[in-house]
């Protein structure tokens, strides 16, 4: 006996996975410009003014977080917008930094712009304190090895060439003593350190008019 076997093959198509959304691109900052003196804001009082922030639209972006940090107090504010401009009320006679985070409603990945610094001017100010030094090494909380360390930072100010010198505070307590004073380099090399120890340090920047700024306290540890 011959048995006929019929195999029915389903006719259909397999659905391909949908492509992942493209992440947002990095925003390009426009103003307030890097290391600039911001004098275009609207004065609200003797202590505050409104400052307009502006950046280029970034691709694949639905909205932006604008992060503004007071460089004297380290306090930050974040405001969200779907536009490429934002007006914020800030303290006068105060240095700030800012950056923009590009966000999309289709994907959790974000993109962060460069970080720029500016000085929000106020009435009656003739000279402006330098920006707090930017610590470059060792970074905050870094664990290092060895018996010496190189301390490095960068300085900047509204007016180019006005930084006179730096005071370096360094030690093993949260109130480190003065280690080097009135140095003109932006580094101190071959600083002796010990194993299994936490070190604290900061940089005071001084300009030619005697104005100063504080980097804030940084720490690192030796393994």
Image (cartoon, grey):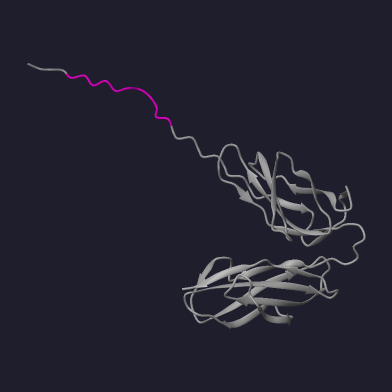
Q: In this view, does 196 lie to the left or right of 92?
A: left
Percent from the top left, x then y, of residue 194? 50, 80
Percent from the top left, x then y, of residue 104? 61, 40
Q: Is residue 161 left or right of residue 97?
A: right
Q: Residue at x 77, y 48 (%)?
A: 54
The picture quadrant where one finds residue 167 is: bottom right
Q: In this view, does 128 lie to the left or right of 171?
A: right
Residue extending furthest toward the left: 1
**Range of residues picked out in magenta:** 5-15
Residue extending furthest toward the right: 124
Q: Which residue is drawn at 50% across and 38% down?
A: 19
Residue extending furthest toward the top: 1
Percent from the top left, x then y, of residue 141? 55, 66
On screen, residue 24 above or below 180: above
Q: Is residue 55 left or right of residue 210?
A: left
Q: Does the magenta stretch include residue 202?
A: no
Q: Which of 42 and 31 is in front in this view?
A: 42
Q: Which of 201 and 112 is in front in this view?
A: 201
Q: Which residue is drawn at 79% across and 57% down?
A: 33
């Amino acid at each position: 006996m011959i048995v006929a076997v019929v195999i029915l093959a389903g006719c259909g198509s397999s659905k391909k996975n949908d492509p992942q959304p493209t992440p947002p691109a990095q925003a390009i900052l426009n103003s307030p410009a890097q290391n600039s003196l911001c004098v275009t804001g609207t004065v609200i009082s003797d202590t505050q003014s409104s400052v307009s922030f502006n950046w280029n639209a970034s691709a694949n972006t639905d909205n932006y977080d604008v992060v503004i940090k007071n460089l004297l107090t380290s306090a930050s504010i974040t405001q969200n917008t779907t536009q490429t401009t934002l007006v914020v009320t800030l303290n006068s006679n105060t240095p700030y930094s800012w950056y923009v985070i590009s966000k999309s409603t289709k994907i959790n990945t974000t993109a962060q712009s460069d970080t720029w610094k500016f000085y929000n001017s106020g009435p009656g100010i003739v000279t402006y304190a330098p920006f707090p030094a930017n610590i470059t090494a060792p970074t905050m909380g870094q664990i290092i090895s060895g018996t010496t360390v190189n301390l490095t930072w960068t300085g900047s100010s509204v007016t180019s060439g006005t930084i006179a010198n730096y005071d370096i505070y360094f030690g093993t307590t949260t109130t480190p003593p003065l280690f080097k004073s009135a140095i003109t380099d932006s580094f101190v090399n071959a600083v002796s350190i010990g194993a299994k120890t936490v070190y604290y340090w900061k940089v005071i920047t001084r300009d030619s008019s005697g104005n100063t700024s504080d980097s804030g306290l940084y720490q690192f540890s030796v393994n």
